[in-house]
Image (cartoon, rainbow, N blue to C red):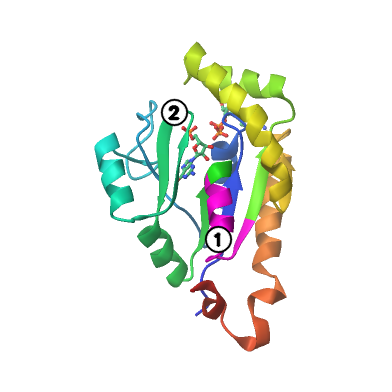
Amino acid sequence: MTIGKLFVVSAPSGTGKTTLLKRVMAQLPGLSFSVSHTTRPPRPGERSGVDYHFVSKAEFLSMIDQGLFLEHAEVHGNRYGTSRTAVDQQLMAGVDIILDIDVQGASILRRLGQLEATHIFISPPSITELEKRLRGRGTENEEMLAVRLANARVELQAVKDYEYLVINDSLEETVDLLSSIIVAERARAHRFPSGKPIGDRVRS
Ligand code: ADP
Ligand code: 5GP
């Protein structure tokens, strides 16, 4: 069996990444979402084990000490990390995985160079629209909103490091574009060099 493929997706907070990914996953089979660990408190409606594994700072630090994260970063004042085992298990089972991680996490993975991944950056049409969406979501107080908007300007500069840029203007069109990228990447011939399964190149 072929080892699964990794899709790293980053976007400034409020761009619509969560909304888009839920839709894309509903229409593309064989695609799984890596549930990260975070110290951020849950938003209304978020469920532990589904949206995130919500953990205390002490638990998070202990996981770092045990080397359980493939990557982790502090984003907007909270900690977020990707479990090494969860990603490994799914890839080995042949499942393609979406990693919804920030630009720092994506950069760590690139530097590690252990896993092949397609890096996709989702951008809002403008900062004004981003602010509108963040306010519309109603999950951030004024202070957190300002932090997320300030960070967005920095994060947008990382787009040059990604293979794909997707601008989330019309939701329907963006879902189609994102799905098309994933479908095309899945079909790439270089996944099977000289007839070898990709797994021979995934593990170092
Ligand atoms: P993120 O996961 O990137 O932080 P969300 O998926 O939570 O963002 O979306 C932020 C807000 O923007 C939500 O209220 C969502 O309904 C809205 N939204 C997402 N995509 C669009 C779009 N293309 N046009 C208008 N609003 C959108
Ligand atoms: P939010 O608090 O809005 O859910 O997420 C804030 C930011 O944290 C987003 O940019 C999201 O992609 C990022 N994030 C979520 N999980 C992880 C993770 O495991 N690692 C890293 N580096 N960033 C993450």
Question: Within 10 Å of the Cα at label 2, are there few (<14), some (14-19), or many (20+) other Cα atoms?
Answer: few
Q: Which residue is mark 1?
A: 6
Name the residue at the top extreme. 142
Q: Which residue is mark 2?
A: 77
- Please determine whether, in this image, residue 163 is positioned above or below residue 168: below
| Disc with the residue nearer the chain's start (1 vs 2) | 1
In the image: residue 23, left or right of residue 39: right
The three-letter amino acid code for the residue at tag 1 is: Leu
- Residue 154 marker: none
Q: Nearer the viewer, mark 1 or mark 2?
A: 2
Q: Residue at x 44, y 71 (%)?
A: 92
The three-letter amino acid code for the residue at tag 2 is: Gly
Q: Residue at x 60, y 41 (%)?
A: 20
Range of magenta residues: 105-118
Q: Which residue occupies the foreground of this view, 171 or 195? A: 195
Question: Residue 2 appears at what percent x and percent y?
Answer: 53, 77
Question: Residue 80 appears at what percent x and percent y?
Answer: 42, 41
Ligand 1, seen in the image, is in the quarter at: top right
Q: Which residue occupies the foreground of this view, 115 or 42? A: 115
- Rendered image quadrant of residue 89: bottom left
Label 2 SS: loop
Q: Residue at x 58, y 39 (%)?
A: 17
State how far apart marks 1 and 2 are (Cα).
27 Å
Label 1 SS: strand
